[in-house]
Amino acid sequence: MKSELADLYAAAKIEVEAAQAALDAIKAQIIATGCDVIEGDDFRVNVGLQERTTISAKEAEKVLPTDLYQSLAKTTMFPAVRYKAIRA
């Protein structure tokens, strides 16, 4: 099926990726200042540490009994949209 939606999606995705890269670069600069708070004219940015704990599904599957792992595991389905250039 031909649709301009494919080109619109890919263009928007590329813009988002470029914006995320720019945001990541600014975030790295902010962290590099070593300041806990940075104030601009309109916004204040707070920098701090957060802790996150994760459990590896692959490792849990290895060490937990199968029935326990299966009772804890949750599988979800979601639509996946990907793009690929068909001409340069």
Image (spheres, rainbow, N blue to C red):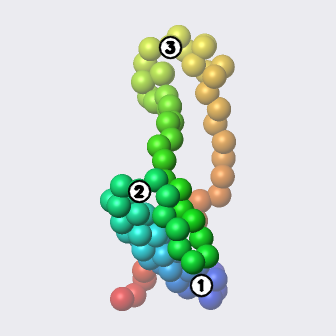
Residue at the spot of label 1: 8
Mark 3–mark 1 distance (CA, rounded to whole Å): 45 Å
Residue at 50% over, 41% down: 50
Spot the residue most to the top.
65
Residue 64, label in figure: 3
Q: Quadrant of the N terminus?
A: bottom right
Amino acid found under the numbered disc labelled 2: Cys
Residue 21, label in figure: none
Secondary element at image label 2: loop
Amino acid found under the numbered disc labelled 1: Leu
Q: Position of residue 52 (x, y in %)?
A: 51, 36
Q: Specify whether residue 82 is in view.
A: no
Chain-order first, disc 3 or disc 1: 1
Observer-side mark, 1 or 2, equals 2
Secondary element at image label 1: helix
Residue at 47% over, 43% down: 49
Amino acid found under the numbered disc labelled 3: Leu
Q: Residues within 10 Å of mark 1 (few under 14, many from 20)?
A: few
Spot the residue most to the left.
32
Residue at the spot of label 2: 35
Chain-order first, disc 1 or disc 2: 1
Q: Residues within 10 Å of mark 3 (few under 14, many from 20)?
A: few
Residue at 42% over, 74% down: 22
Instruction: Please indicate whether residue 65 sits to the left or right of residue 33 in the image.
Output: right
Residue nearest the observer in this picture, 57 or 88: 57
| 86 to 65, vertically: above or below | below
Q: Position of residue 26 (x, y in %)?
A: 41, 69
Q: Specify whether residue 5 is in view.
A: yes
Mark 2–mark 3 distance (CA, rounded to whole Å): 43 Å
Q: Position of residue 40 (x, y in %)?
A: 53, 73
